[in-house]
Amino acid sequence: MTKVIGLTGGIGSGKTTIAKYFESLGIPVYIADTESKKILELPETAILIQAKLGDAAFEKGKIDRRKLADLVFNDKQKLEQLNAILHPLVKQHFKQWLHNHKSSPIVIKEAAILFESGSYLDCDSVITVVAPLESRIERVVKRDNISREMILQRMHNQWSDEQRIAKSDFIIQNSDRLQARQQADEILKKLTIRQN
């Protein structure tokens, strides 16, 4: 039976870097954010979003992700409406992906909102990646080219590290890449021992 290991952390914590490290070790990794962006591109998803949120997130008949982000990150109700559309679609997609990887003893499901979406309930264990606030802000400014205020707004819409840690089985402190990898290796050893 394949074990599903949830991997989460706040914006800029470096969870994708850790996910890629697990992938480099040959473990199948599902990046929920990447898959959800693909699902967002589907015409049938656009129809659902337009029906719920109107035209504000669209540019020339297509979803504009930046406009959509601006729309939902400033309005909790709209964010909930978007999540109500996307989460079931991502969940269904993950189920199919998991079926395709059923020969793997362990798979990783990386999701920023693993707890908020309730999908942590489908995981056998959860790893939370944490990093100092200023490091996180710096990473996101570089990566997404957005303002500090916008980053803090997004952080405000996510669970705090304390909330995540309280519900997690493992924590990776990601202020130093080498140490974070060593922590990931230790967790993997523990998971493999549990597996046998």
Image (cartoon, helix red, strand yellow):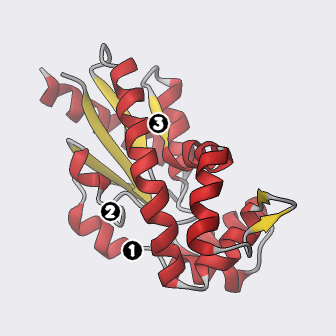
Amino acid type, callout 3: Tyr
Q: Earlier in the sequence, mark 3 or mark 1?
A: 3
The residue where tag 1 is placed is 159
Q: Position of residue 174 (x, y in %)?
A: 49, 56
The residue where tag 3 is placed is 30
**Quadrant where the N terminus is found in the figure:** top left
Q: Residue 186 appears in which quarter of the rendering? A: top left
Query: Looking at the picture, does residue 140 appear above or below residue 154?
Result: above
Q: Position of residue 157 (x, y in %)?
A: 49, 79
Q: Residue 149 appears in which quarter of the rendering? A: bottom right
Evaluate if marks 3 and 1 touch, with contact meaning CB atoms under 8 Å apart.
no
Evaluate if marks 2 and 1 touch, with contact meaning CB atoms under 8 Å apart.
yes
Residue 112 can be seen in this image: no
Q: Position of residue 179 (x, y in %)?
A: 47, 47
Residue 137 can be seen in this image: yes
Amino acid type, callout 2: Phe
Identify the residue at horizontal 49%, vertical 46% (top origin): 32
Q: Position of residue 46 (x, y in %)?
A: 65, 55
Evaluate if marks 3 and 2 touch, with contact meaning CB atoms under 8 Å apart.
no
